[in-house]
Image: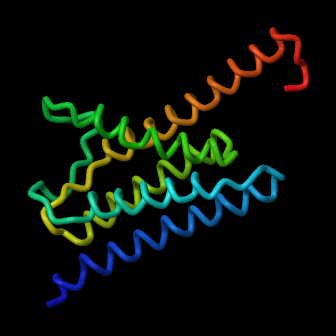
Amino acid sequence: MLAHLAYPLVLALTVLLFIGLTILGVLRTTRRNRTFDARIVIALLAWLAITAYLTQRPGHGSRLNLDLLAYPATLEPLENILYFVPLGILLATLGWRFIAVAGVGMAVSATIEVTQYFVNDGRTADINDVITNTLGAILGWLVVFAVGRLAARRAIGAGNPHS
């Protein structure tokens, strides 16, 4: 009976955590006098909800993997990195700084892995997923940073030093 309740409960708690992170992002954005863009927040909520669903549904793995950089010969590390890039992009677009994005990427990933471990529904809690997911969030932030730098250089090169 408890096992049947664990999945919906953990899923609900994970979604609440993600919503809390989104609210924090909105508050940080409005405090910095940035323009609030509901589309970014909706995209972030959608990404977080899909992530919660995909990572907390029953699977068929082992219970725990703490072997650093021990992946099977699959594309899983690349998939994990690419899956978390949107989180970094969305948070950077909301004005979050590098260290905050890296911390949130790690916190979201660690939350996923810890809940997978405690629910014990056939999913593998894997330290490597935390590493690759965090790298994905960082990569997303770096993309926004690089695009912003290029746009600033072009504006200065075009004779508009105030952009």
Q: Residue furthest top?
A: 157
> Where the N terminus falls, by quadrant?
bottom left
Q: Residue furthest bottom?
A: 1
Instruction: Say which quarter of the image contains residue 142.
Output: top right
Instruction: Say which quarter of the image contains residue 4.
Output: bottom left
Q: Is residue 5 left or right of residue 26?
A: left
- Residue plotted at (27% across, 49% down): 126
Q: Is residue 105 left or right of residue 23?
A: left
- Residue plotted at (48% across, 61% down): 45
- Residue plotted at (76% across, 51% down): 35
Q: Nearer the viewer, residue 90 or 103?
A: 90
| Residue 81 placement (x, y as % from top left) | 37, 36
Depicted 133 relative to depicted 154: above or below = below
Depicted 68 relative to depicted 2: above or below = above
Indicate the colouring scheme: rainbow
| Residue 114 placement (x, y as % from top left) | 33, 63
Q: Nearer the viewer, residue 56 or 103?
A: 56
